Amino acid sequence: MIRHLLKKQNFLYFPMVFVGLLLSLITLNSGCIQAQEIWPTRPITMVVPFPPGGVADTVGRPIAEALGRQLGQPVIIENKAGAGGGVGMAAVSKAKPDGYTILMTLSSISIIPEADKILGKEISYRTNQFAPIARFTADPTVLVVRADSPWKNYAEFVAGMKKTPGKFNFGSSGNYGTMHIPMEMIKLNNQFEMAHIPYTGAGPAIVALLGGQVDAIATGPASIVQHIKGGKVRALAHWGDGRLASLPDVPSFKELGEKVEFAQWSGLFVPKDTPLPIVEKLRAASKAAVNDEKVKMVLEGAGSPIQFLDAPEFQKYWDNDAKKMSDIVKKIGKVE
């Protein structure tokens, strides 16, 4: 009799356990969906892998503020500089993909992995560890020297480099960064020598130029246009296609007969496994941010007008640009 009752109880017990487990899974899944729907519930960190004062920082601050207004939570800038941006980008590549760590960076994201290979270093990160959200700007770098320099135009600059090989130097945001690669391009084209002084970002490199520690830099308009207009530095040429609205008197290298082109674009990324609902919210917030009048005013005033690409178009642009950057790095070769 007792054995019969135990068998009957077991028969009833196992279906009840199954139903309980099923209900638990449904509840857990509903909780996950709800959590994604209400994201964000706390502040978001936007990693800028360069010091304050550079293009990524100049673009990132107004964008972060606008994203915060759209998402209902503050977006806090964290400047995580080092290795030409590699330190901050590597950190985000390993961050938890929960939408609370995002990356505002430059085209150097495509350069550093290739440079690591050439230098025989452990690769800091791979580009497929990130998912693109939006491109905000895409400015050509500008070649600038101090206003008291002896070079009034690009032809005089090249002649000066050739006359005294290795006497002059240029500053950058780090080896193989977006301020270094453009200078190596014109060095190769003209076969002149010029020492390279790497800094942790555009801000320190600009300070070095103004202070006389370096003779030239190549940087985006957003980080230098105020000094050009203030008469502290002189722009000799830029790596773009046509004239820039912010610097209409500065010729492009193409106009000067030199085949070089380089864009220092800025874009927003997240770790690759970030849930789709969060990615979609960030895309929508980014679209709204570029239509924000305050953002437009700040970026246009800095000489870096918005050139927005949403995620699908940005992915195509990034793939194409990454191939170009890889080819350029291979051509430049190993640089100590």
Image (spheres, rainbow, N blue to C red):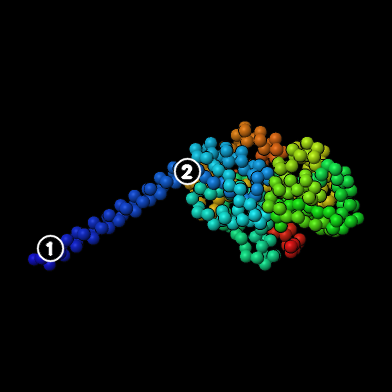
Is residue 122 visible to us here?
yes
Task: Quarter of the image for the C terminus: give it.
Answer: bottom right
Q: Which mark is residue 316?
A: none
- Looking at the image, which residue is at 67% across and 37% down? 299
Q: Which residue is mark 1?
A: 5
The residue carrying mark 2 is 42
Q: Secondary structure at mark 1?
A: helix
Q: Would residue 237 be seen by someone viewing this image from the given angle? A: no
Give the amino acid type for the residue marked by disc 1 in the picture: Leu
Q: Mark 1 vs mark 2: give the one in front.
A: 2
Q: How many marks?
A: 2
Instruction: Please tell me whether residue 194 is drawn above or below residue 231 in the rendered image.
Output: below
Q: Position of residue 281 (x, y in %)?
A: 51, 43
How would you rate the neighbour count of disc 2 (Cα within 10 Å): few for under 14, some for 14-19, many for 20 or more? Answer: few
Residue 86 at what x, y percent from top left? Answer: 63, 56
For residue 163, which quarter of the picture?
bottom right
State the SS at label 2.
Answer: loop
Going by the picture, which residue comes out furthest to the left?
Answer: 1
Residue nearest the observer in this picture, 154 or 14: 154
The quadrant of the picture occupied by the N terminus is bottom left
- Residue drawn 27% across the image and 55% down it: 19
Type of amino acid under label 2: Arg
Q: Earlier in the sequence, mark 1 or mark 2?
A: 1
In the image, what residue occupies the spot 34% across and 53% down? 25
Q: Position of residue 151 (x, y in %)?
A: 87, 46
Q: CA distance from mark 1 to mark 2?
A: 54 Å
Residue 76, horizontal then vertical, whole percent: 55, 43
Q: Is residue 92 left or right of residue 220?
A: left
In the image, 2: left or right of 124?
Answer: left
Q: Within the image, what quadrant is residue 12 found in?
A: bottom left
Classed neighbour count for the residue bearing mark 1: other residues with Cα under 10 Å, few (<14), some (14–19), many (≥20): few
